[in-house]
Amino acid sequence: MALRERVTKPQPAPGLNPAELAIINKGGAPTAEGQTPPSPVEPEKPADEITKWTLRIPAELMALVEKDAKKAFAKKSINTWFVEAAVEKLRAAGVEIEQQS
């Protein structure tokens, strides 16, 4: 049976006070006295909120959408194609929609 040397916990540098040791052991960074730590930054939301979702669509229908979206005279993204199709469908149903950019 092989024996290994016993691993001991490293000892802190001499001259550190208990508060400094607590920060080191916690793993955080100290802040200057009287200064509060920065609050987490909230990511900015776009002016017009966008909703993301997953669409389940038959492969044959998706192939037709991709083909139509990539026509030489149109060349638009699949996302733009679906947004335009939704707007067109809603307008045909009589729903008033603001001009999309």
Image (spheres, grey):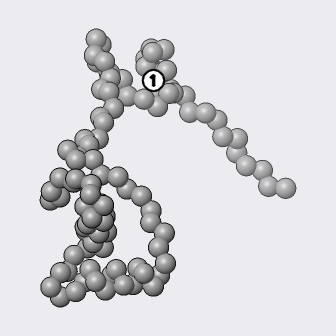
Placement of 33 over or under 2, stated as above or below = above
Label 1, secondary structure: give it. helix
| Residue at numbered disc 1 | 23
Quadrant containing the C terminus is bottom left
Left or right: 86, with 3 as reference point: left
Q: Please name whichever residue, 56 or 8, is drawn nearer the observer in this view of the structure.
A: 56
* Whether residue 87 can be seen here: no
Placement of 44 over or under 82, stated as above or below = above
Left or right: 26, with 49 as reference point: right
Q: Residue 86: where, in percent of width, then height?
A: 31, 64
Placement of 73 over or under 37, stated as above or below = below
Q: Please name whichever residue, 101 or 96, is drawn nearer the observer in this view of the structure.
A: 96
- The quadrant holding residue 63 is bottom left
* Whether residue 3 can be seen here: yes
Q: Residue at x 31, y 86 (%)?
A: 67
State the residue lying farthest toward the right: 1
Q: Residue 79: where, in percent of width, then height?
A: 30, 68
Q: Residue 45: where, in percent of width, then height?
A: 26, 43
Q: Residue at x 47, y 81 (%)?
A: 59
Q: Residue 48: where, in percent of width, then height?
A: 22, 47
Q: Please name whichever residue, 66 or 100, is drawn nearer the observer in this view of the structure.
A: 100
- The quadrant holding residue 93 is bottom left
